[in-house]
Amino acid sequence: MKKPILKRLLRYMKPYLSILVGALLSAIVNVTLTLYGPILIGRAIDQIVGTGQVNFVKLFPILVQLAATVAGSALFQWVQAYCTNKSAYETVRDLRIQTYRKINSLPLSYIDSHAHGDIIGRIVNDVDQVSDGLLQGITQFFTGIVTIVGTLLFMLAISPVIALVVVLVTPLSIFAAAMVARLCHKQFIEQQATQGELTGFVEEHIGGQKIVKTFAYEKHAQEQFEEINGRLYQSGVKAQFYSSLSNPSTRFVNNLVYAAVAITGSACVITGQPTVLTIGQVQSFLAYANQYTKPFNDVTAVVTQLQTAFASARRLFDFLDETEEVPDKQDAAALTNAAGQVDVSSLDFSYSKEISLIENLNIHAKPGARIAIVGPTGCGKTTIINLLMRFYDADKGSICIDGKNVRDITRASLRSVFGMVLQDSWLFSGTVRENIAYGRPDASMEDVVAAAKAAHAHNFIMRLPHGYDTIISEDGSNFSQGQRQLLCIARVMLVDPPILILDEATSSIDTRTEIHIQHAFDRMIKGRTSFIVAHRLSTIKSADCILVMNKGHIMEQGTHEELLQKGGFYAKLYNSQFAGAQI
């Protein structure tokens, strides 16, 4: 599994190949200068024979070279770090952009069926983990490879025999690191998945704290949190335990390498067999033994970050591989100058194949018609809105706007002709003006104020500390539900679309304000096709046609008076609200 993940990560790094080449060249120069240091140190040691026998004439130039070598190594180490950081952060930036872009291309069904906190965790936490892993991985890879090759060449130049001793012991270090990595990989995957679950849980309960406290659910929520946190603890402990074995294991093997070099080198100095070495050369070899084994230690020291990065990358790529929303047809046309005629013919739809929802639905709305959709909860009212907007596609049948099938129209142009006010008001962190102008960012201040006045929001906005420049906190929590709804209505009024969808748009507004809003809606929807989903039947008395739904079917349709005269399902619904009758 790691190889495909690494291959995909490398594809993301391909645009920054020139920067990576710079990092590699800097690593080569840095390591070469670093490895040249022990030779100079060895030569310097050989000039120090004993007390009063130091050859300062030859020693001083060697020390100058050593100082220049150290300075040059530090410079190229900085260049390597700069190139490594730049390539890694550029790569991660692209990865995060693509991940966020993926959200906009996924069907709404995916967003509805997955924890939002887990999706957020993939974009934020998992990308950060990949970033840390890339930085560590690239640095250790470039430096490690160059160091291993360089030290081998330098050791071979001094003594092929001792170099052979080092090479023969090296596989033990690689074997130890590989075994530990295999043990902890599964644990890191489980750790990241559980972390995503915990993020989703916390995000949900922070957003719903009022409900948690209202139902005195704190104790149960705490127990659920501790259960997930406990699983995260267990997987984290196992992952850290296994990964912590890698560094001591490789260090033990590396110490064996160091001891073998020391013993063999000492024998060569004393006996001259199997090769003649000076004390300075032995000192250089010991330094090279440390340099040679250092990359193995460095890699195992960051194995936790590398394993976490691979687990996070896997979660990211699983997300990026999700099936996207069916793209627009190549010959899809843009819908312009829409008159607002809507025709739904023989439409079938269900969210799950096992459970049927809407069957053989037929609706005909002339331009400017006011269509109300009523019925008990779960009958399919909001589903019709989702289908009109192509948040979901019908299983069978067709939806046409001005005689054009919505599948033959680009989604962007289709949705641009709709203005929608939902029961759940959504505001983002920004000024009041920015929120109202969300659909028309270039709208003038006069247009924004006019829309707010039409929505009866202007008065309360002017009472705010900074008027239209007042900052709305995340999700609009510093505004009442009714105020948020008024701002959402003003947002739609500013866009002034040819077709309106009002899904319980006045459900959170007091009765007096609702009357004003209804007058505003009357002015706004005049000459425009509108679909009004409502539970309060008093709000749809003036509708041109009322569709009464139950279990995905239209049971009755007609005007308010016609349906009351029939004495059917609608009459029972109406009387249950105003006369206390039982359905």
Image: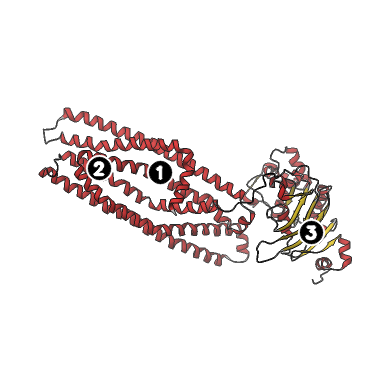
Return the disc, 3 or 2, that comes first in the chain's sequence: 2
Farthest-out residue, bottom: 582
Return the disc, 2 or 1, that comes first in the chain's sequence: 1
Check disc 3 and report the residue beneath it. 362
Instruction: Give the label on residue 288, or none.
Output: 2
Mark 3 Cα-neighbour bin, 10 Å: few <14, some 14–19, many ≥20: some
Mark 2 Cα-neighbour bin, 10 Å: few <14, some 14–19, many ≥20: many
Q: On the picture, is 19 further left or further right than 513?
A: left
Residue occupying the point 22% across, 34% down: 40
Mark 3 or 2: the one toward you: 3
Farthest-out residue, top: 57
Mark 1 Cα-neighbour bin, 10 Å: few <14, some 14–19, many ≥20: some
What secondary structure is marked by label 2? helix
Q: Amino acid at mark 3?
A: Asn
Mark 3 or 1: the one toward you: 3
Instruction: Give the label on residue 138, or none.
Output: 1
Residue 427: x %, y % from top left: 66, 49
Residue 185: x %, y % from top left: 41, 57
What secondary structure is marked by label 1? helix
